[in-house]
Amino acid sequence: MPKKIRLGILGGGGDSLIGVLHRVASHINDNYQIVGACFNPDFAVSQAFAKEIDIPLNRIYSDFDTLVEEELKLPEDKRIQVCSVLTPNFLHFPMAKKLLDNGFHVICEKPMTTSLEEAKILQAAHKASGKVFALTHTYTGYPMVRQMREMIKDGVLGKIHKVDAKYYQGWINEIIHDKDKRSTVWRLDPKKAGISSCMGDIGVHAFNMVEYTTGLRVASLLCDFNYLYEDNQMDVDGTVLIRMDDHVKGVIRSSQVATGEENGLAISIYGEKASFHWEQENPNFLYVKSDTQPMQVFKPGHAYNSKLSLDGTKLPAGHPEGIFDSMANIYLGVARAIRGEAYNDGEFPTMEDGVRGMNFIEATVESSKNNNVWVKLLS
């Protein structure tokens, strides 16, 4: 087996959910070894965390710039090969660009940047670098999501008519109704989160899910946001009407104030022959419905699934897999790309997905602020 890929981590220290998700995912298929990091802007805190998870301190750096500078001094066969960017949104662009400019592969949390302009600049830097760039739309790694994608490519649904995607959470309820609290959360601070909270954080996942599974592109949209309070600059709820290729229409619904909801990403895709329904909170069940046949339920690990789905399944049928495994499938695809091995283009989201995501976010903001007008996306 090839030597493990040398991985660096930016952010994601302490009790960060996204941090442990990436670290566990990188280990699942035995392709990576964490060799360097800057987990926290406080060097002492970063070192303490490195000790806690048993990473040698000699390559725990005081800041991002020092990490790049010192790693470049090392022989090429010793230095970090790929860096995972797990920091708040406003740091994604400068970190990812500097990494690409200096010859590192990049795995980046979404949204990729805080503006479409930055996304285009990063896209050019990526093209010039020749390096691998992956965007962690985690849910594309679920076997049944990949199964949907492959079955749609095979024509199981026929012509698609309508798409209905939603991502509902309720976590911001505890914060948004308290004026003092809402001023302390970085996701409600446009300087750190960018121009959107709800749509930029979770709505873009639903958008990505629509394009990933159907293979179609959103051509235009109309959006209506809810901010709840006059002094709140960031959307916490939104509904988006979408028009896609071939006269396909649909809706993307996203909320951070859906009381009682946990992580409610779901998608329904309706075609002339049949329809699909999948929910992130029950990821091992893909429901296939039609007007002429009883409902079918597809589950991971069975021989009837596609090669892409089975490649992302690690356990025998009937053994539940979850979000760690989903993220691990993205890391697996990136490892193949870094090593120059053959891989399916559905194994990890790319720079193009990041640009599309920023285009979507900016279009929703533009539509809502201009009294809910239709806005075209880039072709």
Image (cartoon, rainbow, N blue to C red):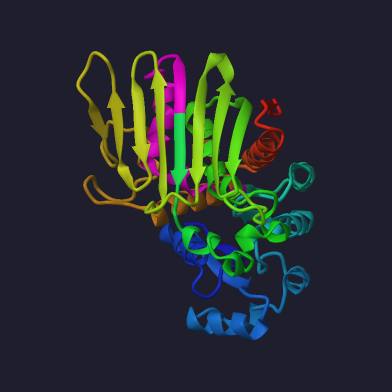
Asked if residue 335 is positioned above or below residue 357 in the image, the reply reads: below
Taking the image as shown, residue 188 lies to the left or right of residue 336, namely right
Question: Residue 231 at x, y = what percent?
Answer: 67, 56
Taking 305 as reference, is 229 left or right? Answer: right
The residue that appears at 56% across and 85% down in the rendered structure is 48
Is 188 left or right of 176, judged from the image as shown?
right
Between 257 and 305, the one lying in front of the other is: 257
Q: Judge left or right: residue 73 versus residue 13.
A: right
Task: Decide: is 18 above or below 317.
Answer: below
Foreground residue, 11 or 237? Answer: 237
* Residue 113 higher or lower than 277, as above or below: below
Tell how many labels. Answer: 0
Q: Nearer the viewer, residue 189 or 41?
A: 189
Question: Is any atom of residue 139 visible in this view?
Answer: yes
The residue lying furthest to the front in this view is: 230
Assign the C terminus to one quadrant of the image. top right
Residue drawn 59% across the image and 36% down it? 224
Q: Position of residue 315 (x, y in %)?
A: 28, 51
Displayed quadrant of residue 151: top left
Q: Position of residue 333 (x, y in %)?
A: 51, 47
Span shown in magenta: 134-163
Q: Hey, which quadrant is residue 372 in on the image? A: top right
Q: Is residue 216 magenta?
A: no
Image coords of residue 202 (percent x, y): 53, 47
Residue 83 visible in this rendered orientation of the protein: no
Q: Establish if 204 lies above or below 181.
A: above
Tell me what residue is drawn at x 53 percent, y 26 percent.
215
Q: Identify the residue shown where x is 76% and y is 74%.
A: 66
**Residue 158 on the magenta span:** yes
User: Which is more toward the observer, 353 or 241?
Assistant: 241
